[in-house]
Image (cartoon, rainbow, N blue to C red):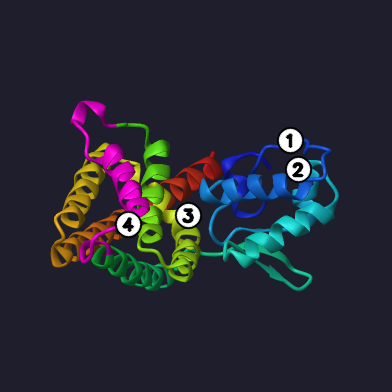
Amino acid sequence: MTTAAARTSHVAIKAKPAPKAASRAEEIYARLREEVFEFHLLPGQRFTETELAEHYVVSRTPVREALLRLQAEGLVRGYFRSGWEVVPIDFARFDHLYELRKLVEVHAVRKLSMRELATETQTMLDALAASWIVDKSARLSDARKISLLDEAFHTNLVAAAGNPEILRVHAEITDRIRIIRRLDFTYTHRVSTTYDEHAAILRAIQRHKPDQAELLIRAHIDRSQIETRKITLHRLQNIRTETQHDAAL
């Protein structure tokens, strides 16, 4: 059950006893979410609550609670008396989410570029500039850290625009695309490109050039979308090839 070949029909994850604290369901949720994000549980893979409960050495109750949360996030789906499935990656759905993301972020950068900013807003943008408008020698290289900083950059741009309802929508979009977006920094060149593009967006805002800021944010999101799609397909293909190879041994 722990071999790569088992991924196609069983839950291929390490059995680790869950904590005895009241946050057991939260812990199971976090573990399962990471398994989905890392493609240890593959898109389209089927499993049961009993299998997961045995692997995590818990009852089915916290497992079910965790799965219901993941279902609400669109990561898994349940079938009546037929177990659960990791939702297959639907690139058409991601295209729609990225389109909505562009609308929100374009609105934000245009709004920030077209007016004098309040002190609090300016402080937020100055903090972003301190992270992204830096010498190459000061740039971070850790992909996981950059992924978190990149997400924070876009979230803070929308937050700085000052509409909490738009920020709420943006947070939902961000959560739904995270499974593929986090792969954007798999390759080193994407890190340096992101630094350059974020710096250019901030400079356009600082210079009160809304049209330029819009063009830059659109191009930036488009490039990220294309890259994450390619990387996701490549990674899934590699995993499936390894699975087939191991099954043949």
Could you say whether the residue bearing mark 3 is in a helix, strand or loop? helix
> Is residue 237 at all visible to an observer of this figure?
no
- Say whether residue 15 is left or right of residue 178: right
Report crowding for label 2: few under 14, some 14 to 19, many 20 or more residues within 10 A (C-alpha). some
Identify the disc placed on residue 179. Answer: 3
Report crowding for label 3: few under 14, some 14 to 19, many 20 or more residues within 10 A (C-alpha). some
- Residue 175, x across and y down, in percent: 50, 59
Residue tagged 4: 118
Q: Is residue 22 magenta?
A: no
Q: Which of disc 4 and disc 1 is earlier in sequence?
A: 1
Could you give the CA–CA distance between mark 3 and mark 1, rounded to whole angstroms?
23 Å
Identify the disc placed on residue 55. Answer: 2
**Quadrant containing the N terminus in the rendered view:** top right
From this view, report whether residue 9 is shown above or below residue 247: below
Q: Which of disc 4 and disc 2 is earlier in sequence?
A: 2
Query: What residue is rendered at 25% in x and 28% in y?
Result: 138
Q: Which residues are magenta?
A: 112-139
Single out the mark in the foreground, 2 or 4: 4
Is the C-beta separation of discs 3 and 4 under 8 Å?
no
- Residue 104, x across and y down, in percent: 35, 69
Q: Which of disc 3 and disc 2 is earlier in sequence?
A: 2
Q: Which of disc 1 and disc 2 is earlier in sequence?
A: 1
* Amino acid under disc 1: Lys
